[in-house]
Image (tube, rainbow, N blue to C red):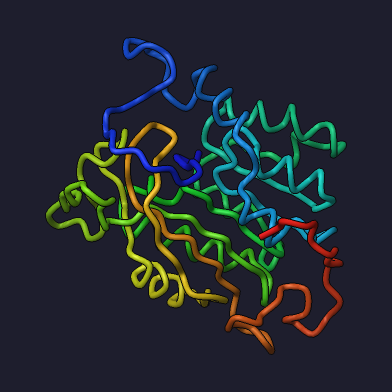
Amino acid sequence: MPDDDPPAPAPATTEVLPGPDADPTPFWEREATVRRFADMPADDRTMGELGGLRGARVLDVGCAGGRNAVALAAAGLDVYALDASEAMVDETRRRLAAFVDDPTERVHHGPFEDLARYPDAHVDAVLAIGVLHIQPSIEAWRATARQIARILRPGGRLLLSHFTPNPAPGHAPPTPVPGMPHVYDDVMRHRRTLLLTPDEADAELAAVGLVPRVATVEHPMTSVTGHAITRLDGDYVRAGAPGAGGPHADPTDADGTDGPSRDAPEEGSA
C-alpha cells in the first residue's frame, strides 16, 4: 500500500484524500483510493532495473492497485504480490488476469507477516516501494526485513523506496516518539510513521544480509496524499553468493547459474 508518487515540488502539507473526510470506509478500501493508485504509472526505476529480466520471479510487497505488478507481468516476468487491502488485491488480480492464468494464487491478501507463506530462496527480486514505513516499530520492520532476505535467492535484489526523517526543504522535522526508535509522530496521514535515513536503512538491511549494489540516494518528493517529505531509494543484493554486493552485482549470474534473460533496455530506460 505505497504512499508513493513521482517527485514534485509542493509546499502543501494539508492532507488531500480521495473522498469526503466523513467517509467511514478505511482509506485503503475506498474506491477512489484504489482508482488513484491503479491509475498511477509504473515506477520508472523498477521498470528500468527489472523490466528486462524476462522470466525472473518477483514479489511486489504492498502492491496497491497493481501498477508495478501488472507492468512487470506484461514485460514477461513471473509476478507475485501481497497487500493488506482487500480492495487493492481485488484490483490487482483483475488487472493481472490479462497476463496470467492464476491471479488469485499470485496476489495474496494479508499483512507483512504473510511473507512467511513463501519458501526460502523463492524469488529473484522483491519490491517494497513506499510501504515499509507503516510498520509500528523497528522490531516489526526488522522482522519483515528478515523475511525478505529469507525469500530472496542469493544474488537476488530488493528495490526499496522508504520515507526518511530528514525534512523536505522549508519544512520542520518530524517529532520522534520517546522510547520508540525511528518512529515519529504526525507524518502524512499516519499518526505514527517509521522513518529511516539512508545510512540507517543500509545498516538495518546489512544486518540481514542485504547489501547496497549502488549508493542509496535521498530526495524530496510529494506523497500521493499531498505531503512534502523526503524519500530514499535503495537497491540491495542478497549476500552469500560469488559476486554478490557492489555496484556490479547482477541477480542473473550472482549464484553462478543461468538466470532469467536480460533484454536490451528500450531507449529512455533508466
Left or right of residue 23: residue 154: right
Specify the quadrant of the image occupied by residue 88: top right
Above/below status of 123 relative to 104: below
**Most distant residue in the left direction:** 178
Q: Residue at x 41, y 39 (%)?
A: 223
- Of residues 87 and 146, the one nearer the viewer is 87
Q: Position of residue 76 (x, y in %)?
A: 84, 51
Q: In which quarter of the image is the C terminus?
A: bottom right
Q: Is residue 92 above or below residue 47?
A: above
The quarter holding residue 258 reads bottom right
Q: Which of 115 and 97 is in front in this view?
A: 97
Residue 15 image offset from top left, x and y in percent: 31, 27
Up-down relation of residue 150 to residue 189 (above or below): below
Q: Which residue is drawn at 28% across and 51% down?
A: 168
Determine whether, in the image, residue 226 is placed left or right of residue 65.
Answer: left
State the image coordinates of residue 263 (x, y, percent, origin top left). 85, 63
Where residue 260 sits: x, y (%)? 84, 67
